[in-house]
Image: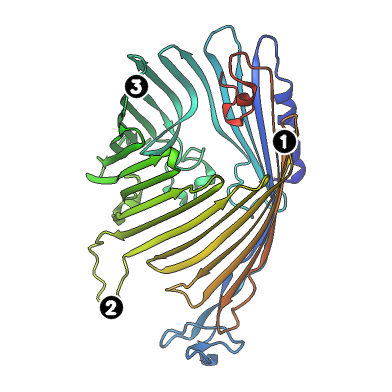
Amino acid sequence: MKPSKLLTLLAAGAVAVWTVPAHGQGYRVRIDTRYQSVAYRGVQLDSSLASEAAPGDNGGLETPDGYAAYCPPGAVYCTYYVPGAVRRGNPLVASVDGVLWGFGVTGLRFVAQARLGGDLSNPDRWPGTQPALQLVEGYAEYTYRWLTAELGRTHVATRLGFWGFDGAKADVRLFDNRLFVEGYGGWGLARGVSLPITSPALNPLNDLQPVDRQTIWGGAVGWSQTGVDARLIYQRQLDGTSKNIASEFAALDATVRPTRGFTLTGGADYNIGEGVWGTADLAATLSVPNGGLSATLGGRRYRPYFSLSTIWVAFSPVAYNLGYASVAYAPLWGIQLWARGEAYKYEDTEAESPNAVVTNDGYRATLGAAYKRLEGWMFRADYYIDKGPGSRSTGFNALASWRLMQPLQVTGDVQQLIRPLEFRFDDAELWSYGLRFDYETISGLRLNAGLRYYDEKRNRPDAAAFSWNNIRLNLGAMVNFGSRIAGTLHPAILSIPEVRGSR
């Protein structure tokens, strides 16, 4: 999309929102605009005659100009990688959230969230900018005592994931909100995006893309009372053409609070479509508010799944199991300490690999601290290590934030990442330096600007040890406006963007 066209659409959308009729109606709108200037590069595959390759200082074969090359026995040509061209992107994205109410029907409102984006330099350079306009949500909602119903583009979020669809959803709350019953259904959206699976933007497989949209149906039943919350969930997806089952799940999650400060949470899901258990988790948390101590001990099993309407389900992904522990402690006012560690292991793939030794386990650990006792200042630092199949990384983050005056906050940070790569020719060390400014006006306008520099060193003995350094600039603006909201909420609460005028 051309810059002029994108800016015209942004301006037109802003004018349309500002001119919403206010005769008896109320509205709240949030416009959040972000811009980035990014430069990045990759590698490019090249080839040369095998007869020109010669042993290099590292013992392997190299091209005449010093690049490490792969030369299969008997091959005429060797292949190698050279630095790719520097590409620059200037993505601009604006999201608009709005709610409109006051139509003479108590409990009726309209909710919409849209995303408008593009690259000001090249429409094909930055991912996720097509299509330029996306409707994330757009539905009519009716609430009356024990009932909430939505009609339009909406979503559900459960332990089965985040699912969007064009259809209807209804929640019923009975017995003083102790019993919860939910049902929903409609034409499903693709996983992870607000687009139908038939959209041209999701068409990497050409003729293998589904012709018709899938349908999704599901529901949940939950019970809540003092110390106990539990919910049973069921969901099914049907292929749009054959009406065969694309996915089918049942799940249960629960939270139990047997005593003050102690909580048990857990759940599991069963993949009915494949006939296997999926993801499960269990965690125990102990909190001592007056003592500033919180600790969690838990475990998790994660198994990915793929739609039965795709070929990927034939690869039979295996699960991994992990155990973790975390603790947070505030010994003095303004000081916080925390630590977390976890160990994991993949289940047996039942695949034979007689010529290779494969690592299937790993661990992660983090140590951190924060200091907030100086007026207007906040300091934070943490160190982490991650060792797993294929690679290992260590590093630290350090951050300092200073509220120079009430509306202005300045934040600076430095990060380090060291990556010894097990299956790569080179190791890498990355330093990152960032500076961010946040400014908030009394009228609700928020402005921010940030600058980040990446300094990456590749430890290669050949000519491919080129610079990966780059600078990224980002600018942002967010504005909230609308009619005065009637009700008993404090103005400070109504200024929170997430409220979105829901009362």
Lateral position of residue 269 relative to residue 189, left or right: left
Q: Position of residue 36 (x, y in %)?
A: 69, 51
Tell me which amino acid carries mark 1. Leu
Tell me which amino acid carries mark 3. Phe
Front-most of 383 and 107?
A: 383
**Quarter of the view holding residue 45:** bottom right
Lateral position of residue 290 relative to residue 273, left or right: right
Instruction: Decide: few, some or many residues near mark 3? Use Cα within 10 Å; few <14, some 14-19, many ≥20.
Output: some
Front-most of 133 and 294?
A: 294
Question: Which mark, residue 180?
Answer: 3
Q: CA distance from mark 2 to mark 1?
A: 58 Å
Q: Secondary structure at mark 2?
A: loop
Mark 3 vs 2, N-terminal side: 3
Residue depth check, mark 3 versus mark 1: number of the one nearer the observer = 3
Q: Position of residue 123 (x, y in %)?
A: 66, 50
Q: Secondary structure at mark 1?
A: helix
